[in-house]
Amino acid sequence: MALNALPSSSAHTPSDEICLRYASGVLDPALRLLVDAHLARCETTRARIALFTQLGATLLDAEEPATLTAGSLDRAFARIAQKQPHETPEDVAAFAQPSFEALSWRWAGPGRRIAPISVPGAALKTFVMKIGPGLSMLAHGHDAAEWTVILEGAYIDEGGRFETGAFIEENEQTVHQPVADTQAGCVCLIATAGSVIAGGLTGRFARWAMR
């Protein structure tokens, strides 16, 4: 299968790199959780992932068989066992039918709440954020990569409007202030490798809430 046969990604779907790492089973568990949530809402990305998976299988089939040496099978099973903790935990998988009552919510300002999620084996911080209709988040930048999936509602920022299911990748060049949809508000699932950059007391409070 040629690479140009793969559907191209849009600004609101995961990059080809993330899709490939997802299909290969080597994506950080927290980021995999976000992709699962996005896949539950995006048929286009499901098709892309399926083609990446098929491409990987085709490339493996084209490889010359390797000669097994003593202990090869044991080593293979050991590598598989080491990957098991990185699977998405069932209690937070996919968010296809969101249920947030069991989460430990923190007050993050009037009409704003945030709840951390513990994802075993993840190197990224993960949390859900709820913003009431028409309310804005803190104007901020990022000191590392951050990924967001819109679970419910939508928001608008300097990059445009992001609807339910949108997968958003931010980096150190991003400076924005998302504003929740005036009717539906916004619920986001977020994974981050760092912290927000914002000055003053509100910035310190935001970093505390997202700890």
Image (cartoon, rainbow, N blue to C red):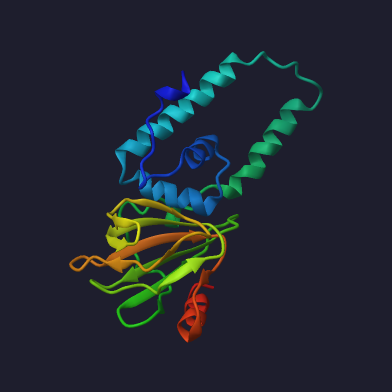
Q: Quadrant of the C terminus?
A: bottom right
Q: Nearer the viewer, residue 86 or 102?
A: 86
| Residue under the image location 34 percent in, 69 percent down | 130
Image side of residue 12 versus residue 163, left or right: right
Number of residue marks: 0
Locate residue 100 relative to residue 208 in the image: left or right. Answer: left
Q: Is residue 37 left or right of residue 208?
A: left
Q: Is residue 17 above or below residue 99?
A: above
Q: Position of residue 37 (x, y in %)?
A: 38, 50
Q: Residue furthest bottom?
A: 201
Q: Is residue 120 left or right of residue 44?
A: right
Query: Percent position (x, y) of residue 13?
Result: 38, 45
Farthest-out residue, left: 183
Q: Quadrant of residue 149?
A: bottom left
Residue 102: x and y in percent read 39, 69
Residue 149 drawn above or below residue 23: below
Foreground residue among 205 and 99? 205
Where is 107 relative to 18, above or below? Answer: below
Q: Quadrant of residue 138?
A: bottom left
Residue beneath the point at 47% across and 77% down: 206
On the image, the x and y values in percent for residue 173 come to 50, 59
